[in-house]
Amino acid sequence: MTKILTPKFNFSFIFLCISISIYRFNNPSENQTLIPKPSLQPPPPPINRKNYIVRFIQYKKAEDHKAYLEHNANEVPYNSCSWEWIDRNNPASKFPTDFGVVSIDDDAVDSVVRKFETLEMVKDVRVDSSYHLRSLLGGMKKKRYDRVGAFVDGKKRPGKIFTSMSFTDGEDFVAAATTANQTIEWKRQLLSQKSQVTSLFGADALWSKGYTGAKVKMAIFDTGIRSDHPHFRNIKERTNWTNENSLNDNLGHGTFVAGVIAGENTECLGFAPDTEIYAFRVFTDAQVSYTSWFLDAFNYAIATNMDVLNLSIGGPDNMDLPFVEKVWELTASNIIMVSAIGNDGPYYGTLNNPADQSDVIGVGGIDYSSNIASFSSRGMSTWEIPHGYGRVKPDVVAYGKNIRGSAIGTGCRTLSGTSVASPVVAGVVCLLVSVIPESERKKILNPASMKQTLVEGAVKLSGHNMYEQGSGRVDLLESYEILKNYKPRATIFPNVLDYTDCPYTWPFCQQPLYAGGMPVLFNATILNGMGVIGYFSSAPSWIPATEQGNLLNIRFTYSDIIWPWTGYLALHLQIKEEGSDFSGDISGKVVVHIYSPPATGETTFQNSTCVLHLKLKVIPTPVRSKRVLFDQFHNIKYPPGYVPRDSLSVHNDILDWHGDHLHTNFHSMFNVLREEGYFIETLGSPLTCFDANNYGSLLMVDLEDEYFEEEIRKLKDDVVVSGLGLVVFGDWYNVDTITKMRFFDDNTRSWWTPVTGGANLPALNDLLFPFGIAFGDRILNGNIKIEHDRCRYASGSNIVKFPKGGFLHRFPLFDSAGNNGHTDKGDGDAAILGVVEVGEGRIGVYGDSNCLDSSHMVKDCFWLLTKMLDFTSRSIKDPVLFSNSVKLKQSMDEGDERLPSRRTELNFSMYSRVIGKELVCRNDSRFDVWGTKGYGLQVRGRNHRLPGHQAIDLGSGLKNSSSDYSVRKGFKNKRSFSFSGNKFFSFLYSDDPLVIFPNQWFLPCIIAVFGVFLVTSLCKIRQKRRRRRKVSGSSR
């Protein structure tokens, strides 16, 4: 009997498994799409150890820190062989330090780091990043616009990610004339007239007074210098901080920088020839450096009381905290730091760190005609985005094109770059420092007072805005006059915001204020020359000049502590509703009272009053159809995440780090829309934080973040019921391509994989689902033409779903997805542009944003954007866009398999402002919703759910609309952000709760129940027969 029953039991169990498996593979659930395909990329190479910086909260001898860690390592559940203290033999070794470098086994990193960070004396533990000073002199035979950066042909070079810092020979910047002879003659004339940059600043006037930089300690952080170089009379010390046994400059970069500051050769004079040169060799001959080398060198500069420090390097990573915080400590120690703003112009939002820090004097470059050099990076700073607004940088500009300086051996050479402009200003600073008697210097001079001297004495350049030039061109003699009579005080930079001063106050002067708009943010810097620490005595106050000034509603956010030497003052400007018909100017001033506690040896507080003057242009509130709202909130940039470039044809700048703001890389788009009569406002908070009835269209361009459920529901209601127009410009997203873009970073000793594509199309598809629209995963390239207008389609996506009655345009393009950058002709024309009316609203979508992005634009599509906004905001239908030949008689749906899928192995919450975050309207929203969840939402709303946590129903709070546009989260449920494990059983323990529909699960449930019933019945029959056998056996 047992042998007979066992096959039946096995058959029942097999029948149950087969029924489930057939359902899972023939009817894939929503969660199944979350399982990524196995990567074809080979596994990363084995890594035994990597170096980490352990920062301590106190300065002690290195051996004391070492003993402290070794003692506490005994408590770790592994032996101390898992990590090793690295001794650093350099000039800083004789001084106390606040960090150590340890090497940790890869398989023990998590546990060792976790243990170290629990220790009372440990501040944090971070990877020892390496800095790469790229081909500063090796690329001088290249063409003018060739740039050698951290990435070449899409591959990362060794070292920390840095932007283009290479110098170029002056002749590469010479414009070619009609004949070679004319070119040579023009160049000779240029060099004969302009070769001595010191004469352009009038340095000889200070030399004649006896000021030559004497007894000023100048630290040059660079590639070193020869001890016997004939151009220098006062090389006090040379120190080596690298792993190479050399003090000499074998590249020529450090020598040139030193020559601009303190050279005495008559052919290439420096500004302060008597300055004491302290050459810090922090870069190897391979142009590589590490954070730990910089930290040691910075500590040594502090310990040896340097006066000025020049740093002609920079990069986009403003989140390398050991480096950034050490710069703060350096300036807090009263060392004046000067740094190049970067060679990433003419693009906006390309400021380099540390020059973008408010305590550092950031220097941009100009040519001899006082025009901003094309290579000079532009502001604004991007630290504050999306909720805030960037600061004005650079601080000043100086000549940086065709500058003469010392060559590596003997003689002079001509070079260009902001890395040239930086030592020009450093030389000016050394000369100014020598004006103050040595005994009084530390009382009067500090990073804030020197910056005040430079910006107040600078000459504002005509034709350039403040994010290009800062306060203007350095004026040595005017700054000298200011410094002679300087008294410690606090000031605001800039100290004027004048809407009538165009183009200097662009973008503010480009668009007047009006009632009902989003707050206009202006971020000013507090410079506190009274002390390294300062405070606001009271809240800032607005004092209008006339009665009309009371129409201005102004709020302030500002630094709790002004340290080191600087702070911020942000103005949030709104016009009150009673000013909706007002037209004219509003003038007045913002008054701020600052105080600093007594310095060492003093007993009295220092107080200062500083003023920011405002002259604002106000107009009546524009009609709704002319107002456009730009979504800034859903943008993610580098740092902290690896957000890839939007155009895959750009191989030497693979990071999306320019801010994606209306006033950075979208500044040209902003200007064009203003010229077309549109008023563009910025939304730095979720979509629930604006009133759709005030705007003709919402403009969404190149967005990388996810969306709150509440945002999706509100936007659907805004479009269908409230008549809001929606314009979306997407970008590429393809998981295979994303995976192929990963690279091994020797800085962090880890693999870097993009956190998203050019845009987050899976999230955008969730947002557009209620309207029957979706983007696909193709990566398309080519030229498109609509009537007489053309533009370049650069790594854009395709449209795979579009509703009936819409107008969908197709073009013959090449598909590069999955071909590692090689293009293959796609099967048929691709749909990339669609317009449709939905309820009371109108929608336009386009698959590429590169034609709006000034950074890597080939050919703009502003004409297309204008046509789309004319439709979505004003219901003006362009006859070509709305040709009957492209009207859909049926909905277009290429199938869910054409939809891009999310990368499920990524912890996206590390970079997102949505996943795991609270939905709240912040200080960039209208004042009436600050700190709330926005319009139409009750206070009992919820955070965006994390994977594995049940969502809480909002209940009422959003308007109800037609069921034809009911919301479901996307065409597929792709919300999970953690890998769900085994593909077959993923539905059993997926992170997301299943959405169960009877038509999908009814049949398999019946089969499963039947299988369980059959197994149970067979077991009972078996048990009964066993009992009968026992009874019959006992009776015998």
Image (tube, rainbow, N blue to C red):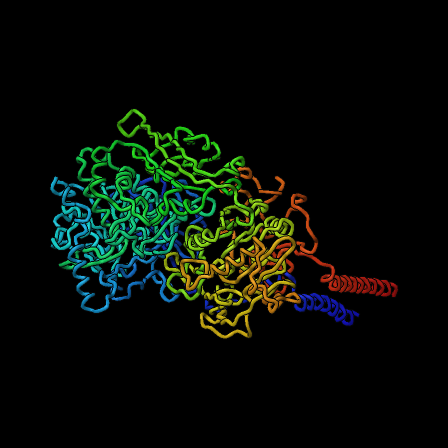
Name the residue rendered at 25%, 61% in the picture. 173
Q: In the image, 1033: left or right of 320?
A: right
As drawn, 143 above or below 717: below
Q: Where's residue 207, x and y in %?
A: 13, 43
Q: Quadrant of the C terminus?
A: bottom right
Q: 335 or 386: which is nearer to us? A: 386
Q: In the image, 629: left or right of 506?
A: right
Q: 942 or 398: which is nearer to us? A: 398
Q: Where's residue 240, x and y in %?
A: 22, 53
- The outermost residue toward the right is 1035
Whether residue 223 is visible = yes
Name the residue rendered at 48%, 58% in the picture. 755
Count of picture labels = 0
Name the residue rendered at 63%, 48% in the picture. 722
Q: Where's residue 698, x and y in %?
A: 54, 51
Q: 900 or 876: which is nearer to us? A: 876
Whether residue 636 is visible = no
Q: Where's residue 501, x and y in %?
A: 36, 43
Q: Quadrant of the N terminus?
A: bottom right
Q: In the image, 20: left or right of 324?
A: right
As drawn, 859 above or below 937: below
As drawn, 530 above or below 1026: above
